[in-house]
């Protein structure tokens, strides 16, 4: 079998992406992997997961949250975190009826470009079914 250019010893390379959501702290993230297929000296197949040219553990074995390092992580198809973020960002919420308080001067409201910490409810909101 021939090797794949740029992947010494690999007989095939597959690119896969996954979305992850921590069930402890609610952090969500996405990651893409290059999965190299190899054959060892005894003729058995094995795979190596690569990110940025570095070998990393399989995300399917025991993923850890990038935020709290907990191992109760849900793995989903790619794009689920991004679609949940987009839905939360574009959701139009009707304010409740009644008087509304204006923020006090010097209030530290999140401005454009500031990072938002996503909670599990933010990520799973998109998956909830609407009552008919």
Image (tube, rainbow, N blue to C red):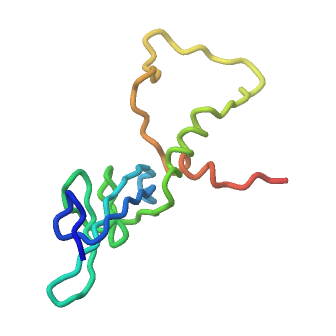
Query: Residue at 25% across / 60% down in the picture?
Result: 50
Coordinates of residue 101 in the picture (x, y in percent):
63, 17
Q: Nearer the viewer, residue 34 or 105?
A: 34
Quadrant showing the N terminus: bottom left
Residue farthest bottom in this picture:
42
Q: Nearer the viewer, residue 82 or 126?
A: 82
Asked if residue 95 lies left or right of residue 20, the reply is: right
125 to 9, vertically: above or below: above
Query: Residue at 51% across / 59% down in the picture?
Result: 77
Query: Residue at 65% across / 34% down in the picture?
Result: 91
Asked if residue 66 lies left or right of residue 6, the reply is: right
Residue farthest front in this picture:
2
Coordinates of residue 14 in the picture (x, y in percent):
36, 63
98 to 48, vertically: above or below: above
23 to 85, vertically: above or below: below
Q: Nearer the viewer, residue 73 or 50?
A: 50
Residue farthest right in this picture:
132
Asked if residue 14 lies left or right of residue 99, the reply is: left
Residue farthest top in this picture:
105
For the image, the number of numbered tags is 0
Coordinates of residue 100 in the picture (x, y in percent):
68, 18
Q: Nearer the viewer, residue 30 or 35?
A: 35
Asked if residue 78 lies left or right of residue 58, the reply is: right
61 to 73, vertically: above or below: below
Query: Residue at 28% across / 67% down in the picture?
Result: 36
């Amino acid at each position: 079998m021939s090797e794949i250019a740029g992947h010494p010893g690999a007989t095939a390379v597959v690119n896969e992406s996954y979305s992850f959501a921590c069930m402890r702290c609610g952090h969500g993230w996405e990651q893409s992997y290059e999965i190299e297929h190899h054959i060892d000296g005894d003729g058995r197949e094995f795979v190596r997961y690569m990110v940025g040219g570095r070998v990393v553990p399989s995300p399917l074995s025991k993923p850890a949250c990038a935020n709290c390092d907990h191992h109760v992580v849900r793995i989903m198809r790619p794009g689920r975190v991004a679609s949940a973020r987009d839905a939360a960002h574009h959701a139009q919420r009707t304010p409740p009826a009644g008087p509304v308080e204006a923020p006090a001067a010097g209030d530290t409201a999140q401005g454009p470009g500031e990072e938002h910490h996503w909670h599990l409810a933010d990520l799973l909101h998109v998956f909830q079914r609407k009552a008919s």
